[in-house]
Image (cartoon, rainbow, N blue to C red):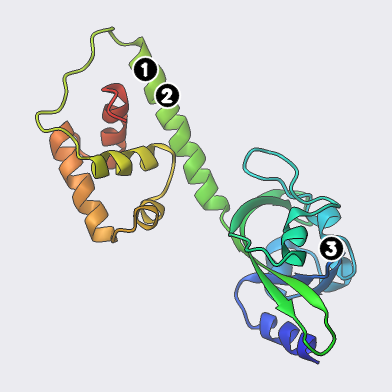
Amino acid sequence: MLERELYLLLEGTADAAFTVDPQGSICSWNRAAEKLLGFSPAEVLHRSCADLFQGRGPLGTLVCRDHCEVLECVAAEREIPNYDLEVRARSGRRLWVNVTIIVFNDPRTGHKLAVHLMRDISERKRREALTENVLQSARQLASLGNDSPSPAPPSPLTDQEKRVLTLLAKGRSASDVARDLGITSRTLRNHLHHANQKLRTRNRLEAVMHAIRRGLI
């Protein structure tokens, strides 16, 4: 009965949501999951989620497999942080999602389910890849320049300004940087403004490129 109530609750979320039993078999599949991945409930229920998604991690390694580390953590009642996963949709195309795992225990039956909540982050991944390509080009151009180091900025960058530029250089979005550093968006903008003044640059990309070229980050 509680599991049925859970399935009804998941139908109301905008996130793609489905539940998996300890053996990796899909037990429920909401409308948002069908919209995101293209599979109907009839096509996925009681199938192995590993076979269905063929999920890979950021390094290209296979994450979804028979001996699923996520389900092992669920069984051991260990905390599972959010993670990014590249999955296969029904059309065959692959897309990036961020996954949140919630463990559901039914005290009446003793059944345990792993609730998977998925959000499409393909656009974020595309931006990160584009930023990384631009920064890689900037590093190559810097290496082709003259061997004499560029002059340091009139006022040195603070440690926090360096942290901000370093995270941006890794392709992190502004909101991600603010969250990682535990600061507000306004404080982040202030750090970028001061870094631009010191480096005599006009925007965050120029600031990152100049900081890399000068060996500041």
Q: Which label number is shown at residue 24?
A: 3
**Which x, y percent locates residue 110?**
83, 82
- Horizontally, is 8 left or right of 216 in the view? right
Find numbered disc 1 in the image and state the secondary structure of the residue it sits on: helix
Instruction: Please rate how many residues cluster around mark 3, counting C-alpha atoms within 10 Å: few if below 14, some from 14 to 19, many from 20.
Output: many
Residue extending furthest toward the left: 154
Residue drawn at x 61%, y 71% is 15
**Which x, y percent locates residue 83?**
60, 55
Instruction: Please rate how many residues cluster around mark 1, counting C-alpha atoms within 10 Å: few if below 14, some from 14 to 19, many from 20.
Output: few
Q: Earlier in the sequence, mark 1 or mark 3?
A: 3
Q: Which residue is mark 2?
A: 137
Q: Which three-letter amino acid code belongs to the residue tagged 2?
A: Ser
Quarter where residue 8 is shown: bottom right
Residue drawn at x 64%, y 38% is 59
- 3D distance between C-alphas at marks 2 and 1: 6 Å
Q: Are marks 2 and 1 in contact (CB under 8 Å)?
A: yes
Find numbered disc 2 in the image and state the secondary structure of the residue it sits on: helix
Query: Which residue is nearer to you in this view: 174 or 106?
Result: 106
Q: Which three-letter amino acid code belongs to the residue tagged 1?
A: Leu
**Which x, y percent locates residue 108?**
81, 90
Q: Which residue is mark 1?
A: 141
In the depicted structure, whether residue 3 falls above or below residue 170: below
Q: Are marks 1 and 3 in contact (CB under 8 Å)?
A: no
Query: Which residue is nearer to you in this view: 37 or 194?
Result: 194
